[in-house]
């Protein structure tokens, strides 16, 4: 099935806002939706609004005392440092609980559209808040919308769900939520924890008793660019998805792996990220009958990177990829300049080849990326009946 992708969107999602000095500015998503509109993609998409969620929906992932703490901080604006709410990464703001719940409701709405047979692919651009833990806010994330959506789908009877996270940061909150659940495979491609928040995600952390091998971590050295990152993806993600055979694929598309991102140290291009989107699209059809829930995530180069990468993602998921050499619409450039004062990019490409040598060509123990690949494959491939060596 191809055709219109379902996009879950409401301007009320922009209320998830920690303030003008915070890196996670809602303008990232606003500029993405504006670029998608001006590129003609929203005309071909089916737009739906977030679902209303109950406390019980959130409680499948988050502790009741934490939900109560978020609600209290949302009403009073006072920090609750024991719950990670306060100055720094997760400052409190009025309406915080409602805004975070709406983001979860957007990702759940996409999942619900797929389960109802109303959509094959569903994109929640404001989602991807993957760091929130059961009882604590973390890394700009109050509630964990991918985990809430996965837990909601499990409660509807879905038996196997795979989650692939290409954000530069370890998808620790989603991994933690399902660490002991063999029904959920989590794969995180991230910068090595020695050089980046949250400091977790080594390959030997691979699932609890009864769920061994269902938590997969690919920890890549700082400075890894398109060739190494794509080689690592090729070596790990397709074989595991083919072995696991999920009924639904959920993906988190944080684009802070880009070389311009101010908070991390990988060196990907727009073109490399676009290649990953296409790969995940193909794998959704190959392994999950096309059932694909997509979310946004991190990404802090809010004009140069996020809108282009996620517009490519939306185009790819619609089955009509954009020509990377295409110009960005002048109407969007004018809007972005007026909105941010920055000079926006003029094309949809970084001009990178986004090429790589497949890992099947052989393992080079002198190469740091290959050593990272083998650490992951040694840790989890035998648990799926796969050979670690290429």
Image (tube, rainbow, N blue to C red):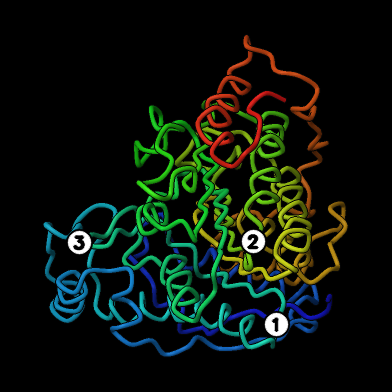
The quarter holding residue 312 reads bottom right
- Vertical arrangement, residue 253 with respect to residue 1, above or below: above
The answer to which of marks 2 and 1 sits earlier in the sequence is 1
Badge 3 marks a residue whose secondary structure is: loop
Q: Is residue 115 visible?
A: yes
The numbered dot on residue 119 is 1
Please tell me which residue is depicted at 62% across the width and 9% down the height of the picture. 366
Q: List x then y, in percent, for residue 203.
A: 46, 33
Image coordinates of residue 32 in percent, x first then y, are 63, 67
In the picture of the structure, the residue carrying the numbered disc 3 is 85
Marks 3 and 2 in Cβ contact (< 8 Å):
no
Residue 283, image x and y in percent? 74, 56
Measured along the vertical axis of the image, is residue 268 above or below residue 66?
Answer: above
Residue 165 position (above or below residue 146): above
265 vs 115, nearest the viewer: 115
Picture disc at residue 60:
none
Residue drawn at the location 62% of the way across and 67% of the way down: 248
* Residue name at image x 62 percent, y 53 percent: 244
From this view, report whether residue 222 is shown above or below residue 218.
above
The spot of residue 275 in percent (x, y) is 76, 48
Point out the tag, 3 or 2, that comes first from the N-terminus: 3
Residue 21, can we see it? no
Foreground residue among 247 and 344:
247
Q: Few, some or many C-alpha atoms within 10 Å of disc 2 (few <14, some 14-19, many ≥20)? A: many
Q: Is disc 3 surrounded by few (<14), some (14 to 19) or many (20+) residues within 10 Å?
A: many
Q: CA distance from mark 3 to mark 2?
A: 28 Å
Q: Which residue is mark 2?
A: 307
């Amino acid at each position: 099935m191809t055709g219109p992708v379902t996009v879950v969107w409401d301007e009320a999602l922009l209320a998830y806002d920690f303030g003008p000095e915070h890196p996670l500015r809602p303008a990232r998503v606003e500029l993405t939706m504006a670029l998608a509109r001006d590129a003609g993609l929203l005309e071909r998409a089916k737009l739906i609004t977030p679902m209303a969620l109950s406390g019980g929906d959130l409680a499948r992932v988050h502790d009741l005392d934490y939900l109560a703490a978020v609600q209290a901080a949302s009403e009073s604006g006072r920090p609750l440092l024991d719950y990670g709410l306060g100055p720094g990464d997760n400052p409190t703001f009025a309406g915080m609980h409602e805004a975070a719940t709406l983001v979860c409701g957007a990702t759940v709405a996409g999942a619900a559209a797929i389960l109802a047979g109303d959509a094959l692919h569903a994109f929640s651009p404001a989602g991807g808040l993957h760091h929130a833990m059961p009882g604590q806010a973390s890394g700009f994330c109050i509630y964990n919308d991918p985990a809430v959506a996965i837990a909601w789908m499990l409660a509807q009877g879905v038996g196997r769900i795979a989650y692939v996270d290409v954000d530069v940061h370890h998808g620790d909150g989603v991994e933690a939520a399902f660490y002991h659940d063999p029904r959920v495979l989590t794969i995180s491609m991230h910068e090595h924890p020695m050089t980046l928040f949250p400091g977790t995600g080594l390959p030997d952390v691979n699932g609890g008793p009864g769920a061994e091998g269902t938590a997969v971590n690919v920890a890549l050295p700082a400075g890894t660019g398109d060739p190494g990152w794509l080689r690592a993806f090729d070596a790990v993600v397709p074989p595991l998805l083919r072995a696991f055979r999920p009924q639904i694929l959920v993906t988190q598309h944080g684009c802070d792996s880009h070389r311009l991102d101010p908070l991390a140290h990988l060196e990907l291009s727009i073109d490399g990220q676009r290649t990953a989107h296409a790969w995940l699209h193909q794998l959704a059809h190959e392994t999950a009958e096309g059932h694909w829930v997509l979310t946004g995530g991190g990404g802090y180069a809010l004009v140069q990177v996020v809108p282009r990468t996620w517009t490519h993602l939306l185009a790819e998921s619609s089955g009509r990829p954009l020509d990377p050499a295409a110009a960005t619409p002048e109407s969007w450039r004018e809007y972005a300049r007026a909105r941010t004062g920055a000079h926006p990019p003029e094309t949809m490409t970084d001009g990178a080849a986004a090429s790589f040598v497949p890992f099947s060509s052989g393992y080079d123990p002198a190469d740091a990326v290959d050593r990272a690949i083998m650490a992951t494959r040694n840790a989890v491939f035998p648990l799926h009946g796969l050979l670690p060596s290429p």
